[in-house]
Amino acid sequence: MSATIVIGRALLNRIHADLDRPHAFAAERGGFLTCRSESDGSGWTIRSIDYDPVPDVEYVNVPSVGAAVKGSAFRRFQMKAHSEPVSIFHIHRHDHHGTPRFSSVDRQEGHRFVPDFMTVRRELPHGIVVLSYDAAHALVWLPEDPHAAVVGEVALAFD
């Protein structure tokens, strides 16, 4: 099954503006996309409706990674998915042009926390997105097989 994530241009600009902000010790910033998702039986359309940055106080000083985030940030979005029928995607940026790729840490951490979103809202897809300055890459866990490793890459559409 396929999936397409749609991020509106205004929202994308807001995300980039947030990710541009320096942090006292984290080398990169991140946040969470809240999305409405629907399936037509052959694929998923995932429309981003909001972005919430990770607050400064929820970063943990771990020099070996670009950014580490406290579990409280993830739990807050688990609660959001529990109370609303939304998909949750963690999003961050690698500062270059061209198609970004997930680091081994990105993949490892995604495999650790995305299944938690699947547990609270198992009928919807969830995942991770990495941006570059001009492109994006995503990995999505689909409800058809929520315990699979990463189900696959998805197309991203910017409207």
Image (spheres, rainbow, N blue to C red):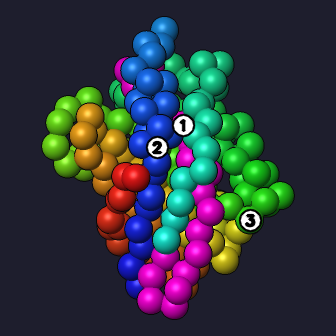
Nearest the camera: 49 or 126?
49
Q: Is residue 42 magenta?
A: yes
Does the residue at mark 1 contact the one at mark 3 (Cβ under 8 Å)? no
Secondary structure of residue under mark 2: strand
Q: Is residue 57 magenta?
A: no
Q: Amino acid at mark 3?
A: Pro
Image point 44% across, 58% down: which residue? 6
Percent from the top left, x then y, of residue 5?
44, 61
Q: Amino acid at mark 2?
A: Ile
Nearest the camera: 64 or 42?
42
Image point 51% across, 19% down: which residue? 61
Secondary structure of residue under mark 1: strand
Viewer-nearest of discs 3 and 2: 3
Q: Which mark is residue 13?
A: none
Query: Would you identify the image quadrant in which residue 70 lies?
Result: top right
Residue range highlighted in magenta: 25-44
Give the class, few, some or many, for how many residues have Cα within 10 Å of label 1's Cα (few <14, many ≥20): many
- Decide which of tag 3 and tag 2 comes sooner along the chain: 3
Q: Which residue matches tag 2?
A: 91
Percent from the top left, x then y, of residue 135?
26, 46
Q: Amino acid at mark 1?
A: Gly
Main SS category, magenta section: strand
Residue 73 visible in the snapshot:
yes
Image point 58% across, 75% down: which residue? 38
Q: Which residue matches tag 3?
A: 85
Percent from the top left, x then y, of residue 152?
35, 71
Does the residue at mark 2 contact the one at mark 1 (Cβ under 8 Å)? yes
76 w.r.t. 21: above or below: below
